[in-house]
Image (cartoon, rainbow, N blue to C red):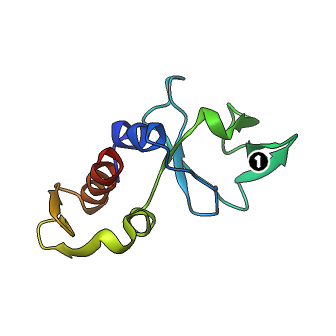
Amino acid sequence: MITLEQAARLRKAGVLWTPAAGDRFVVPDREMDDDVFVVSDMTVEVHDYQGSKVIGFNGTTEWALDSIEQREVIWLPREEQLRALLGSHFVRLEAGYTVELTGSTHSSPDAEQAYANAVLHLLDA
């Protein structure tokens, strides 16, 4: 899984998120940085409310929240989502979690973190 720091940098760099079932996110700065939530049709749903996205927590599973605006959470993209962001720049994922792009490589002890580093490299370029 990518780090919260990487996810925050992706958001700051302008990576847009359209929440969908299976997406992971964190609620930062509320003493819940280590809690990863998953959008699900049963417990965590996304609603349009007066022109903005609101993430609703259903039932008693997420007892401390009823809902939170999308702009208040940080998306933790999965491997395939990060790879999609690389588009035609992606060449391959090598053994040892090294992402090869046209013109650069990005290594990490975790595949998703390597992909995130590659995306951040493209956005910084």
Q: Is residue 48 depicted above or below 66 in this figure?
A: below
Quadrant assignment, res 110: bottom left
Q: Is residue 89 depicted above or below 53 in this figure?
A: below
Q: Pick the residue in front: 6 or 45.
A: 6
Residue furthest to the front: 125
Image check: 36 left or right of 106?
A: right
Q: Give the image location of residue 49, x and y in percent.
A: 85, 42
Image check: 43 left or right of 48?
A: left
Classify mark 1: residues with Cα within 10 Å, few (<14), some (14-19) or many (20+): some
Q: Secondary structure at mark 1?
A: loop
Query: Residue, x 64% and y 63% (percent of image)?
Result: 21
Q: Give the image location of residue 26, x and y in percent.
A: 51, 40
Q: Is residue 36 depicted above or below 110 in this figure?
A: above
Image check: 64 left or right of 88?
A: right
Q: Pick the residue in front: 23 or 42.
A: 23
Query: Residue, x 76% and y 47% (percent of image)?
Result: 58
Quadrant assignment, res 80: bottom left
Query: Residue, x 70% and y 35% (percent of image)?
Result: 68
Query: Residue, x 33% and y 55% (percent of image)?
Result: 119
Q: Give the image location of residue 93, x and y in percent.
A: 21, 73
Q: Which residue is mark 1?
A: 58
Q: Amino acid at mark 1?
A: Asn
Count of numbered circles in the view: 1
Image quarter in which the N terminus is found: bottom left
